[in-house]
Each structure stands twice: as structure tokens, then as C-alpha cells.
Amino acid sequence: MAERSADNLLDQCISPHVAMAQRDHVRLDWQPPYGALARVRPVAWTCTCRATFYELCEGGGQAFIRRTVQLDDKPEISETYRWLIAEARLVWTALLAGRVR
Ligand SMILES: [Zn+2]
């Protein structure tokens, strides 16, 4: 994506980084990519300078968080359950703050 490569080109971080997970953080249930939701688009993402980055994806009135772990051979992608968009945005905020992971 253009936004991500722009981060690298400028050699500085534009997108947010997730905070360290708090000791009592809520663990999200990460599933293999579901892949059936049409017209999914990322609406927010964390900086790809970290080995693990996250995207808030919305589509069809639902939303979920996609986690990508950048491994040497190929990225390992997992996703949360689908939520209502408003719920997913709350989870996204909590993710950035380290309250869920
Ligand atoms: Zn960064």
C-alpha cells in the first residue's frame, strides 16, 4: 500500500505504533483469515517498521482487526472476529493503548 511504503521512503514513522501490552491486557481471539467479507478496506493501521503490525478493516457494515507478523519467508496473517464497526473501533483504540492484544 502506498501509505506503508511512504513510511519507509521517508525513513520516519508516520503511522502509530501499538503500546506495550499491559500486564492485565485482554487477549483477542486470533483466527486464520476468513476472507469472505466483500469490499474490505483497511481504515487504520499501525506502522510497519515493527515485526507485527495491525490493520483495522471495515466492510459490509462489519469490522475486524487483521494482524500481520512479518516473517522472513512469508507474513503470518490472522484476524479477529467480525464486530459492528463502532465496537471494532473501540477494540482498535484499546489495541493501540495496549489494553488488548
Ligand atoms: Zn514505525
Image (cartoon, rainbow, N blue to C red):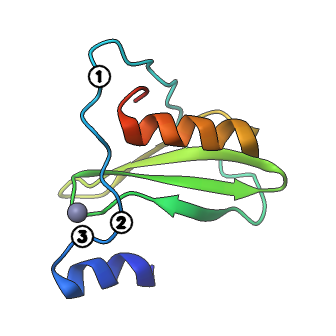
What's the CA distance linking mark 3 and mark 2?
6 Å
Residue marked by disc 1: 22
Q: Quadrant of the C terminus?
A: top left
Mark drawn on residue 13: 3
User: Percent x, y for residue 91?
Assistant: 56, 35
Q: On the rendering, which quadrant does ligand 1 occupy?
A: bottom left
Mark drawn on residue 15: 2
> Does residue 82 appear in this view?
no
- Please state which amino acid type lies under the numbered disc 3: Cys
Q: Are marks 3 and 2 in contact (CB under 8 Å)?
A: yes
The image quadrant of residue 47 is bottom left
As rendered, which of 78 and 25 lies closer to the eye?
Answer: 25
Instruction: Please tell me which residue is depicted at 21% across the width and 86% down the height of the picture.
Output: 10
Instruction: State whether label 3 is within 8 Å of ligand 1.
Output: yes
- Please state which amino acid type lies under the numbered disc 1: Gln
What's the CA distance linking mark 1 and mark 3?
23 Å
Looking at the image, is 21 positioned above or below residue 63?
A: above
